[in-house]
Image (spheres, grey):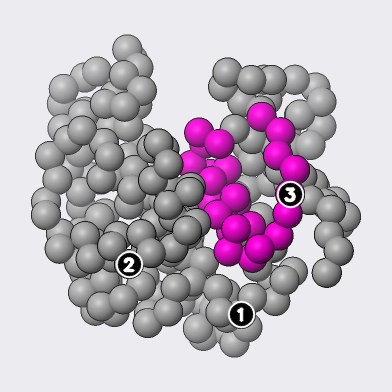
């Protein structure tokens, strides 16, 4: 399938790396441009015309412009009909998508304060009480993932690797790399070993990224 694809966003962004790993799994070529912190600002009129939220990534292809990383990933997998990554049947698809949505609406917000405090060392995120609460909230969400992985003994949505594992795999790596106290969570540790066998995880999670 011929498909012209451009991705706007810096590789240090975890949301950009979701899209890049998805492209890697699909085996498709793309052109990427650096935008965001340290590069051309997303508040520029040129970027705002593409995404009024001023957030990366943005995808531009033959069909138009898309933003929101999870939506971009769904779109690409559907465009290339990779039903192993996102099933066509409603029930198994919903099981993948519920964990994708959980990553965006529950897991991501839980790490906000902690990540800014301990990794980015932002001066506005140094309240010890809020930091302790943030660490607890993040670990609690990861505890939910631990229980799910105990049930599947494989990947997030079941026996096979899916699109949900791209999103959550990057999030798990961020949790592991943040300097804080964490429960051992052996099912998550085993899950990461499975992900390490994939070249996409090695490139877009392990290659110096947090």
Q: Nearer the viewer, residue 190 or 63?
A: 190
Q: Percent from the top left, x then y, of residue 30? A: 74, 49
Q: Percent from the top left, x then y, of residue 158? A: 37, 80
| Left or right placement of residue 63 versus residue 25 in this view | right
Q: Nearer the viewer, residue 207 or 163?
A: 207
Residue on which disc 3 sits: 30
At a point 42% along the width and 41% down the height, the residue shown is 207
Residue 176 visible in image? yes
Dot 3 or dot 1: first in sequence order is 3
Whether residue 67 is in magenta: the answer is no
Q: Percent from the top left, x then y, of residue 26? A: 64, 65
Q: Which mark is residue 83?
A: 1
| Left or right placement of residue 63 versus residue 44 in this view | right
Q: CA distance from mark 3 to mark 1?
A: 21 Å
In this picture, which residue range is highlighted in magenta? 11-34
Q: CA distance from mark 2 to mark 1?
A: 20 Å
Q: Crowding near pointer 1: few (<14 within 10 Å), some, many (20+)?
A: some
| Left or right placement of residue 93 versus residue 190 in this view | right
Q: If the image is split into quadrants, where does the C terminus sit? A: top left
- Which label sits in the foreground, 3 or 1? 3
């Amino acid at each position: 399938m011929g498909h012209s694809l451009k991705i706007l966003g810096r590789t240090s962004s975890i949301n950009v790396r979701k899209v890049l790993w998805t492209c890697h799994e699909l085996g498709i070529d793309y052109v990427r441009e650096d935008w965001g912190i340290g590069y051309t600002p997303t508040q520029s009129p040129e970027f705002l015309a593409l995404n009024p939220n001023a957030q990366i990534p943005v995808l531009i292809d033959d069909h138009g412009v898309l933003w929101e990383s999870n939506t971009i990933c769904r779109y690409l997998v559907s465009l290339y009909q990779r039903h192993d990554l996102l099933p066509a049947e409603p029930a198994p698809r919903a099981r993948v998508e519920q964990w994708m949505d959980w990553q965006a609406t529950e897991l991501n917000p839980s790490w906000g304060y902690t990540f800014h405090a301990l990794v980015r060392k932002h001066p506005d995120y140094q309240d010890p009480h809020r930091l302790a609460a943030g660490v607890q909230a993040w670990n609690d969400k990861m505890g939910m993932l631990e229980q799910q992985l105990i049930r599947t003994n494989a990947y997030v949505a079941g026996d096979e690797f899916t699109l949900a594992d791209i999103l959550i795999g990057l999030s798990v790596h961020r949790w592991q790399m943040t300097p804080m106290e964490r429960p051992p969570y052996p099912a998550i540790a085993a899950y990461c070993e499975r992900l390490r066998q994939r070249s996409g995880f090695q490139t877009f999670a392990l290659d110096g990224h947090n």
